[in-house]
Image (cartoon, coloured by chain):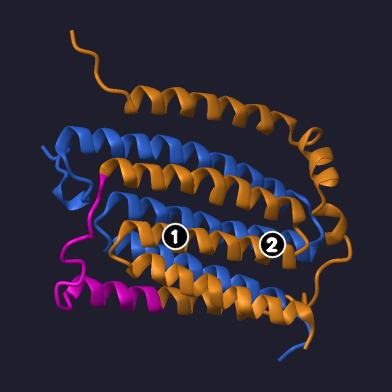
Amino acid sequence: MSLHVIMFSLLAILAIATGVLLVTRRNPVSAAVSLILHFFALSGLYLTLNAQFLAAVQILVYAGAIMVLVVFVIMLLNLGKEQNLRENFNPRTAITIAMSAALIMQLVLTFTGNPTGKNQLSAASEKIGSPAEIGNILFSTYIFPFEAISLLLLVAVVGSIILAKRTVDK
Amino acid sequence: MPQNIPLEYYLALSAIMFVIGAAGVVTRRNAIIIFMCIEMMLNAVNLTLVSFSSYLGDASGQMFVFFVMAVAAAEAAVGLAIVLSLFRSSQTVYVDEVNLMKW
């Protein structure tokens, strides 16, 4: 068994387990912690795909920035446990589980029904995942989306400040 | 156990992760946890894009993931600001107790 197979299996199990924990925990803080673990597992999966730059960005942006923001908001709101999450076994949960199982079946069948025959990483993948190559493409082919995304981030920052600040007394 | 991981394994994993996130969005009541489940769904799609990019040897997929991450960061800032102002106005983050837009 190669290292790739072992790493993929471990990280896939970790990712699914932390995903299930996120959905089932009643306490928002333990949900947030399992989501952080989930992001780390995904970063490892990106490494098995030779996407080094994205693995680093995943930890920096998601685990570093977004989750800190989420945990801060949980702290500010001082949330308790979610009440009556599982008030016995209500029909909504049963319907959700059935629909989810059906959706998983359908997606997995769609993806695996017609084998692509791609059994190993492309030889070029080591090169295209590197920061140098990503930077080259980002600042040549994708320069316009890059500028547009910076404008979007600016608008989002201004908008969130306006939304979150207290209303001024007249 | 295969010696190499076929592309389909990554696609199936990301499908499972996407559906777990979707189930969380439908069942949970806490707006912050719904928000985290949406982040997880975005990540599942990112995994699909990266695996196609690596298996086909095309960098465009990884650029898409980069932009999705930037949009997710913007979404996080705005979404959490909305949750904060919602809590300030109606003292709750449970989505079934909010009826501001009901008419």
Residue A110 visible in this rendered orientation of the protein: no
Residue marked by disc 1: A33
Position of residue A127 in the picture relative to residue A9 (left or right): right
Residue marked by disc 2: A46
Chain painted in blue in the figure: B
Q: Which residue is drawn at 35% across and 63% down?
A: B24
B103 in relation to B31, above or below = above
Residue A168 visible in this rendered orientation of the protein: yes
Under circle 2, the secondary element is helix
Under circle 1, the secondary element is helix
Observer-nearest of B95 and B102:
B95
Residue A63 on image: x %, y %: 55, 51
Q: Earlier in the sequence, mark 2 or mark 1?
A: 1
Camera-side mark, 2 or 1 = 1
Name which residue type carries label 1.
Val
Name which residue type carries label 2.
Tyr
Q: Which residue is drawn at 49% across and 45% down?
A: A66
State the mark number for residue B54.
none
Give the residues drawn in magenta, as a range: A78-101
Position of residue A103 in the picture relative to residue A94 (left or right): right
Chain painted in orange in the figure: A
Q: Per the image, is A92 magenta?
A: yes
The outermost residue toward the left is B103
Q: Which residue is drawn at 24% across and 57% down?
A: B29
Position of residue A164 in the picture relative to residue B95 (left or right): right
Position of residue A58 in the picture relative to residue A69 (left or right): right
Residue B22 on image: x %, y %: 39, 63
What's the distance in space between the residues labelled 2 and 1, CA to CA?
20 Å
Image quarter in which the C terminus of chain A is found = top left
